Amino acid sequence: MKCPICNIGVLKKKHIEEVMFGIPLGKFPAELCTQCGESFTDAETTRRIEDVAKKKGIWGLEMKTKITRTGNSLAVRIPKKIADFLNLKEGEEAYIHPEKNRIV
C-alpha cells in the first residue's frame, strides 16, 4: 500500500519504538513508510500506546500557553500540570534555546 503522507513510499509492517515527550513507551506494531518514515498504527495499538502514556502520567501534557510581558522581557507561563510533572519549583533555573521558529 502506498503511503498516504508522501505518496511515494510503501507501507511495511514493523515494530517501532514509540516515544512521547522524550519518554519511551515501548515497542508496538505499525506500518512504516519506506520513503518518509511516517508510522501508522491500528486502533487497538493506538489505544495501548495511549494507556501506557496515561500510566506514565504524560498523556495530555501538551497545551498552549500565553507569552506575556514582564518589564522589558517576555515571559512564558508553564502550566501547572507540566510544572508538577517536571517537579519545577519557583526560582529554579531553566535552560532554553531557539530551534527554528520555536523555543526548546
Image: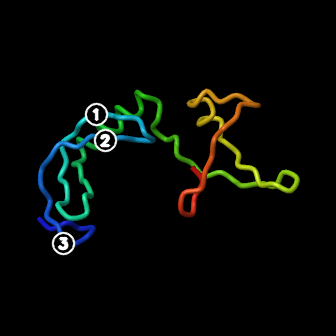
Q: How is the image coloured?
A: rainbow
Q: Look at the picture and state if 102 lies above or below 45.
A: below
**Alpha carbon distance from label 2 to label 3:** 23 Å
Q: Amino acid at mark 3?
A: Ile
Q: Which residue is mark 3?
A: 8
* x and y, in percent, of residue 51 in the image: 35, 33
Residue 56 versus residue 79 in the image, above or below: above
Which percent across, then down, holds residue 15?
Answer: 18, 42
Q: What kind of element bears circle 1?
A: strand
Which label number is shown at residue 96?
A: none
First in sequence: mark 3 vs mark 1: 3
Residue 103 vs residue 76: left or right? left
Q: Which residue is mark 1?
A: 26
Instruction: Kindly give the residue lying farthest to the bottom in the view shown.
Output: 7
Residue closest to the eye, 44 or 23: 23
> How far apart are labels 3 and 1 at the CA level?
28 Å
Q: Can you say whether 36 is above or below 91 in the image?
A: below
Can you tell which quarter of the image residue 81 is in? top right
**As shown in the figure, which amino acid type bears the numbered disc 2?**
Glu
User: Which quadrant would the N terminus be assigned to in this image?
Assistant: bottom left
Q: Is the C-beta separation of discs 2 and 1 under 8 Å?
A: yes
Q: Residue at x 17, y 53 (%)?
A: 31
Q: Earlier in the sequence, mark 2 or mark 3?
A: 3
Return the residue at label 2: 18
The residue depicted at 47 percent of the width and 35 percent of the height is 58
Instruction: Identify the residue at horizontal 24%, vertical 53% (top origin).
Output: 40
Q: Earlier in the sequence, mark 2 or mark 1?
A: 2
The x, y position of residue 16, in whole percent, is 23, 43
The answer to which image quadrant residue 52 occupies is top left
